[in-house]
Image (cartoon, rainbow, N blue to C red):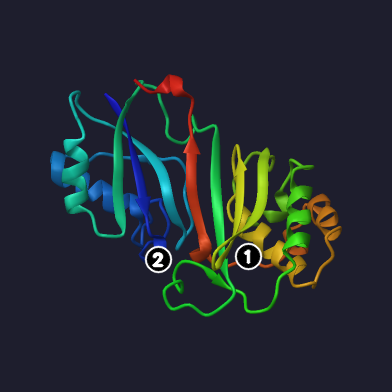
Amino acid sequence: MRYFLELAYQGKAYHGWQRQPNAISVQEVVENKLFTLFQEHKEIVGAGRTDAGVHAKQLFAHFDAREGLNEDLVFKLNSLLPNDIAVQALLPVLPGAHARFDAVSRSYEYHVIQEKDPFAHDSAHLVKRNLDVDSMNAAAKILLEYSNFKCFSRSRTDVFTYNCKIEYALWVQKKDRLVFHIKADRFLRNMVRAIVGTMLEIGLEKMEVKKMHDIIRSEDRGEAGASVPAKGLYLTQVDYPKTIFI
């Protein structure tokens, strides 16, 4: 029987979600703890492969096991996992359900602070200069006019298409943090961090808002801004059709 695990993790200690040959990943840690419980290897497939240092407030991964598993597995798995990884739910799904390919949308946040904060050092990007948030939101609206985002993609990638359908993109002030929200059907590797880096240049008045059009049309990564640090990026939600859940 197939199950979805709903997970959350703080990404500082990990080289991303996906198992790596020479670095520790979230996937490896969870699979190792599942082996402890089942005494057999359980390969888990995640909804996406977050980069090194990126956090997840919600990520789903599927695995196959015998019928009859229940929320007791959540308690047992959490007792084995380190404090920076948590299992939030165990959900039975249809046999063909796939955590990556059945996802219909993904949402991210990027957190920016503008004053030094020792408690946010590992969870947000510090930008000390004043930012023109209205201009940044004007640039964010431009994203909705396009579908090809090759200019924001990591140069060496094996994707078949650079097209993504962005549903919304918006900067919001939340107390001491400026948070960028973005939702799309899919994202390219490094895409959100490159978009944020470009919009910060606009907010710092190093680039005009209308330049966003030229950057996207160029399909050239070199035209966009530098990628911001991974520590400010959070995968916040992954959506699926209700029909895959039992």
Q: Residue 12 carries which label?
A: 2
Q: Classify 10 Å Cα crowding around label 2: few (below 14), some (14-19), many (20 and above).
A: some
Q: Name the residue under label 1.
A: 227
What type is the residue that disc 2 sits on?
Lys
Contact, mark 2 vs mark 1 (Cβ under 8 Å): no
The residue tagged with tag 1: helix, strand or loop? loop
The answer to whether 80 is drawn above or below residue 100 in the figure is below
Seen from the viewer's position, the closer of residues 116 and 90 is 116
Q: Which quadrant of the rendered structure holds the N terminus?
A: top left
The answer to whether 21 is drawn above or below residue 188 in the figure is below
For marks 2 and 1 on the same chain, the one whose residue lies earlier in the sequence: 2
| Residue 121 drawn at (x, y percent) | 46, 74
Q: Which residue is drawn at 35% across and 45% down?
A: 7
| Residue 99 drawn at (x, y percent) | 42, 34
* Left or right relative to 36: residue 240: right
Residue positioned most to the front: 175
The answer to whether 50 is drawn above or below residue 223 in the figure is above
* Left or right relative to 146: residue 163: left
Q: Is residue 71 visible?
A: yes
Q: Which image quarter: residue 107?
A: top right
